Image: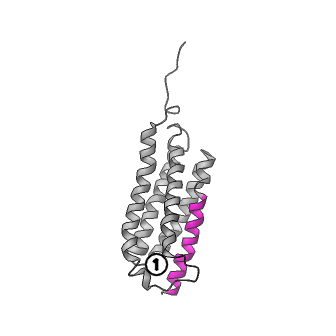
Amino acid sequence: MTTLPETSIDRRPPLWAALAIAILPVVAASVAGSAATVPQIPTWYAGLVKPAFNPPNWIFAPVWTTLFALMALAAFRILRLPIGLPGRRRALVVYHLQLLLNIGWSFAFFGANSPVAGLAVIMVLLLLIAATIAAFRPLDRLASNLLWPYLAWVGFATLLNASIWWLNR
């Protein structure tokens, strides 16, 4: 029996590589975001006027842990697709760009103590999350659907960010 040579469209990354590429950037985003955020919570953030719908501080850690786990799983599913699959590379680029903006929001809002800078970043972040969902959809419907809770939470966070900016201007 003759076997055809494997092409890049058929080749998949090794499981360990897909796991590392899915998990490490999410962990890095979580650690970097926490480094900018946590020191500001009892000081600067505590002194801000917040809207009545502001959640208690304890809710953010479990919500973000869940969202980051969903992001990593979604990215892993896309990473395990054949390397040459049309749209795969673009989807992963958009995904990683939104992850960078996720970190950027923490540094803009908390690190720079600037709700207006945070608002500018989070509005672009919302667009990139939606673009990631759209880019993932034709490749893997489940991976795309795993990002909807993230989009919903960041939508809520945008409203919260805008309200904090408005109340503290």
The stretch of residues the image draws in magenta is: 148-167
Considering depth in this image, is 144 or 49 the residue closer to the camera?
A: 49
Specify the farthest residue to the top.
1
Residue 123 lies, in percent from the top left, at 53, 69
Determine which quarter of the picture holds residue 55.
Answer: bottom right
Characterize the local packing of mark 1: few (<14), some (14-19) or many (20 or more) Cα atoms within 10 angstroms. many
Residue 6 lies, in percent from the top left, at 49, 26
In the image, is 114 to the left or to the right of 146? left
Q: Is residue 24 above or below residue 109?
A: above
Residue position for label 1: 115
Considering depth in this image, is 72 or 107 the residue closer to the camera?
A: 72
Considering depth in this image, is 124 or 167 the residue closer to the camera?
A: 167
Say which element carries label 1: helix
Residue 64 lies, in percent from the top left, at 50, 63
**Which residue corresponds to the image point at 47% horizontal and 78% vertical from the top-left?**
116
Q: Quadrant of the N terminus?
A: top right
